[in-house]
Image (spheres, rainbow, N blue to C red):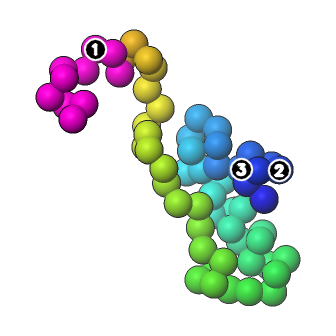
Amino acid sequence: MKAYLRAGMGPCQGRMCGTTVAALIAETRGASMEETGVLRPRAPYKPITVGELADLPEEELA
């Protein structure tokens, strides 16, 4: 689903659509939300620019 619709891959990383998409999948499959699960957050949890990443001190990058 994620590969075709790119759900959860926008700027909010699924925080807005994740539960709705999981509910639609559960309903279509006739399963519960617990069985279907939800989108797992992946780093970065908050989108940042390359410039912000470059400005991080080296000790934070380790």
Q: Disc 2 marks which residue?
A: 4
As drawn, which residue projects farthest toward the front? 62
**x then y, percent, for residue 9:** 64, 43
The amino acid type, in three-letter code, at marker 2 is Tyr
Magenta span of residues: 53-62
Residue at 59%, 83% (x, y): give it.
Answer: 34
Q: In which quarter of the image is the C terminus?
A: top left
Residue 7: give its label: 3
Residue at 82%, 81% (x, y): give it.
Answer: 29
**Is 60 positioned to the left or the right of 51 in the image?**
left
The amino acid type, in three-letter code, at marker 3 is Ala
- The Cα–Cα distance between marks 3 and 2, rounded to whole angstroms, is 8 Å
Crowding at mark 2 (Cα within 10 Å: few <14, some 14-19, many 20+): few
**Is 30 positioned to the left or the right of 38 in the image?**
right
SS at circle 1: loop
Q: Quadrant of the N terminus?
A: bottom right
